[in-house]
Image (cartoon, rainbow, N blue to C red):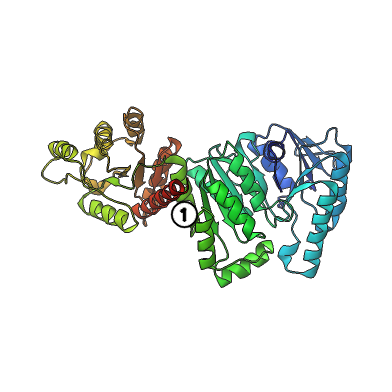
Amino acid sequence: MRLTQNDLDKFFNPKSIALVGVSRSGWKFGGLSFLRKYLQAGYKGNLYPINPKADEILGVTAWPDLSALPEVPDLGVVAVAAAHIPKIIETCGRIGLHHLHLLTSGYAETGTKEGRKLEAQLIAEAEKHGVLLIGPNCMGPYCPTSHMTAWGAIPGIPGPLGIISQSGGMTQRLTEYTASLGLGVAKAVSVGNGCVLDTLDFLEAFGKDPSIGTIGLYLESVKDGRRLLRVAGEVGLKKPIVLLKGGQSAAGARTALSHTGALAGNHLLWKAVARQANMIPVRNGDEWADTLMALSFIPEPSTDGVFIIGGGGGSSVVYGDTCIREGLKVPQLAPDIMEHLRKVTPVAGSIAGNPLDLWLTFSDPAFLAEIIDLVDKDPSVGMILADRLIARAAFHMPDEPDPTPATLAQLKKRTGQKPIVFVVDAEGGDSELAAQGASVRAAYGAAGYAAYPTIDRAAKALTRICRYYRKRAAAA
C-alpha cells in the first residue's frame, strides 16, 4: 500500500489526536498512559480523550465518543478490547477519521483460531471503511519534531534517522539508545502485526522522505519476500538500511511467532536476502546503533584506510590489529607527512607513524587538530580514528578540566574534510569511569561525531559503511 505525504503527516505530525479508551485514573499501560506521555512530551495539538463516564482526564476535556468531537482528528489512538474495534472502525469511517494507531493486542500473535479470526475481521473492516491502520499490538508512530513521543526517548531529539520495527520494545530501545549518543530521529514507527500497513509500506515511504537519511529496520518476518527485495533494493541504493533480523534461531523463531504472529526464517537465508536487497545486516542492538551512528555522522570516506591516533604503545598496536582484522587498512603515510610527524614526536616514549603514539594529542587539543589537518592531506587515508583518554590517577597527570569542549572547538576550525571517529575506551568494571565515558561520547555525538566505547565496535562499524558505499558505487 502506498503511503502519501499527507498520510505521513497525519501519522507523524497530526494537528489533533483522539485517544479511545482512556481510563480516569491509575498507571495501567494504555490510553491514559499515552495521554500522560503526550502531555509530558509537550505535544502542541488538540488532545481528545474518549471516555463516556468522564468530564475531564488529567486536566483535558473528555468526550463520550468519537462522534461527539468538535472536529475530525487527524489521528486516532485506540486502546480498547479487540471485540469493540469493528464498531470503532465503522465510526471512524463515518466521521472521516482515516488514520489509526491500534494499540490493542489479542489478535494473530496469540496463536489462536479466535485471534486469527479477529485479525481477518479487522482487515476487512479497515478496507471497507477506508481506514489506514498501524498495528494492532504496537506502539505506533514516534516523531520528536511534532512532540509525538509517548514512548521511547521522551521528549527525544530530532535527527536524520528513520526507524521501522515490528517490535515496540526494539523501537523504544533504539530511540533511547541513539538519543544518548546525540543522534536524533526524524520518524520511528512500531508496526506490530502490520495487518493493514506493514513494514514495507513504511520502508517505501521513508525512502522518499527528505527528512530521513538513514533507516534502521527491525524485522521478525515479512509477508511478501519479492516486495521486500524490490523495495529494499531500491531504497538501499539511495539511503542505507541497517537490518536487525529477529528470529533467526529456532528459539527466536518460536518467540517471534508469539510476539507478532508471524513466521521467521533461518540465518543463512536472511543473510542472502540482506545482501541481495542492499541492506546492511547486524547481529544485535549495539551493532545496530553503532552502524546507524556511523552512517549518520560519517560522510562517505574516500578510502578504507584509517589513520590511528592511539592511546599508548600497546593500545596503538591493538588498535591497528583490530582495524586490519575487521577489514580496514592501516596504510603507511606519505614520506612528507612522516617527516613532519618525526619532527614533532619525541624519540622517547612515543612512536611516529600509523598508528601514532603521541601523548600530546591527549593533553593539547590544538596540537591534536594540527595532526589531524596534516594527515588529512594523505590520499591513502580515508578516515581518522582518535583515541580519547579519561584522566585518572594511574596517568600521573595534574587535575585538568575535561578537554572535550576545547577539542570540539578546535575541530570546528579544521581545514580538512576527512571524517574523524573517536574511541572513548571507558568500559570495564569501573562504574564511575563508564559514566564519564558515556558523557564524553554523548558530547562528541551532539557535535556530530561518531564516538565508540571500544576499538572493536568502531572498527566493525567503519568496515560496514565502507562495504556499503563500495557496493552502492558498483551498482550506480
Residue 88 vs residue 261: left or right? right
- Residue lying furthest left in this view? 347
**Residue visible at 41% across and 41% down?**
300
Residue 53 visible (yes or no): no
| Res. 329 visible in picture | yes
Looking at the rendered structure, the number of numbered marks drawn on it comes to 1
Measuring from the top left, give residue 80's x and y in whole percent: 80, 53
> Which is more toward the observer, 30 or 304?
304
Foreground of the two, 1 or 375: 1
Image position, residue 259 (x, y; %)? 66, 63
Q: Name the one closer to the observer, 417 or 52.
A: 417
Give the SS element for disc 1. helix
Circle 1: is it few (<14), some (14-19), or many (20+) Cα within 10 Å?
A: few
Residue 419: quarter of image? top left
- Name the amino acid, label 1: Asp
271 sits to left or right of 89: left
Establish if 217 lies above or below 341. below
